[in-house]
Amino acid sequence: MSQHPFAVGGPALAQRRNLVTEIPGPASRQLLERRQRSVARGLSHVLPIFVTAAGGGVLIDADGNSLIDFGSGIAVTTVGNSAEAVVTRITEQVAQFTHTCFMVVPYEGYVEVCEELNRVTPGAHDKRSALFNSGAEAIENAVKIARHATGRPAVVVFDHAYHGRTNLTMAMTAKNMPYKDGFGPFAGEIYRAPMAYPFRWPGGPARCAADALGVVRDLVHAQVGEHNVAAVVIEPVQGEGGFIVPPPGFLPGLADYCREHRIVFIADEIQSGFCRTGDWFACDHEGVVPDLVATAKGIAGGLPLAAVTGRAEIMDSVHAGGLGGTFGGNPIACAAALGAIETMTKEDLPAAARRIGDIMLPRLRAMAQHHPVICDVRGRGAMIAIELVKPGTIEPDATVAAKVAKACHAAGVIVLTCGTYGNVLRFLPPLVISADLLDEGLSVLEDTFSQV
Ligand SMILES: Cc1ncc(COP(=O)(O)O)c(C=O)c1O
């Protein structure tokens, strides 16, 4: 039984940073001891405080501390925790029915979510959607569908990619530790190309888009054969790999290349989608229309839901019964998604994400002027990061990133790290965070840089 049965979260929570104990406090430490005895070690925590309520831009822990949330549970609570429309719709749905399995007996909520996905994802063409439980499952299914539609085996992915932790998605993910180490053998027919990473491109950022496209063409031609490639899978802004924004022209060029060779272009918008980057999807910034889009995370206000949405002829190439799963598109998760999408539309959350970026980017750039350890400030909308290096070099400095993150946590601001080299601090505030709280979180970050 919870020690805090009556804690209530949501937007009505006081929007302030307020520490009443050290972080983590005694109640969290006690829960952590129970956690160590009962939960597998392989699951780790960014910060071991135990949450009792959350909403807007704050998390409340078991000791009564109120922390500013710059993580959104890794880009999930885009509409805020326990957002009003999400809670209302879930509550109604829970009272009606909790599960039938869409493959046994269908229900309207599932269809409605698919209609919404077909509407909001890039492109005005005829689309179909299918719902799943997690981002990794969506990627697995997107690849299944592309292989089935094309009759081809190969899949092209990129350096720094993150697509999940299942066997196929581990193979597609680039980074060994902690995601892949000791978990092989991995699925076959995955080919990796260099990512168009402007900051680290050997010929410099100006040459990055054209060079990187050339490398993809050469690599596929020489090592795979275009006619063997079912799909190219890319995060339009890379997430775990370091919030890498490809240079203008790279994504449109890749989409053209795929069209030329009848390769299915799959956008993994699991982290970048649903208003996060200041548009509904990151592909929208350059008018790129993928054949298939994988979504999850921000889609349902925190409930587990994922989707593949794409061209009707590709999606419907799969025979009846070829896709599915017991829980995929659970009615409560669908109700939550409808509440989340309603909130994103009514409150114009793409504009909210752009406002967040407009506040964060100049402040972070100013910090970079004073702290040469910050070598790159990048991102779109409310998906922003700073990359840290040993000053005067491009040598990644993961130690300083970890130190800054730890100091922010101790001061009551939840920030996350990422990057292949662990040297990137990423910021993913809920899009409903107030400007005051955002400013305060940035001031804490600034102070922290002066200390480490
Ligand atoms: C871009 C991207 N793809 C796939 C995944 C995997 O999603 P999940 O953790 O829901 O399986 C993630 C999760 O972080 C992600 O960021």
Image: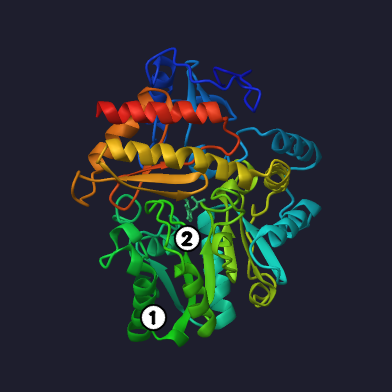
Against 108, residue 365 (above or below) is: above
In the image, is residue 356 above or below residue 419? above
Determine which of the numbered discs, if any, sits on residue 217 in the image: 1
Helix, strand or loop at label 1? It is helix
Tell me if residue 228 can be seen. Answer: yes
Q: Residue drawn at (57%, 53%), measured in percent from left and top?
A: 273
Residue 101 pos. (x, y %): 71, 54
Among numbered discs 2 and 1, the one appearing first in the sequence: 1
Q: Which SS class for mark 2?
A: loop
Q: What kind of residue is marked 1?
A: Arg
Camera sees residue 40: no
Q: Amino acid at mark 2?
A: Glu
361 or 40, which is in the foreground? 361
Instruction: Tell me the quarter of the image containing the C terminus.
Output: top left
Q: Residues within 10 Å of mark 1 (few under 14, many from 20)?
A: some
Mark 2: C-beta under 8 Å from nearest atom of ligand 1: yes
Around disc 2, counting alpha carbons within 10 Å, would you say few (fewer than 14), some (14 to 19), or many (20 or more)?
many
Q: Is 354 positioned to the left or the right of 205 in the image? A: right
Observer-nearest of 80 and 356? 356
| 321 shown above or below 24 | below
Front in this rendered view, residue 138 or 161: 161
| Quarter of the image where the N terminus is located | top right
Measured as percent of width and height from the top left, residue 112 is found at 77, 55
Q: Residue furthest top?
A: 20
Residue found 57% across the figure and 32% down from its top: 433
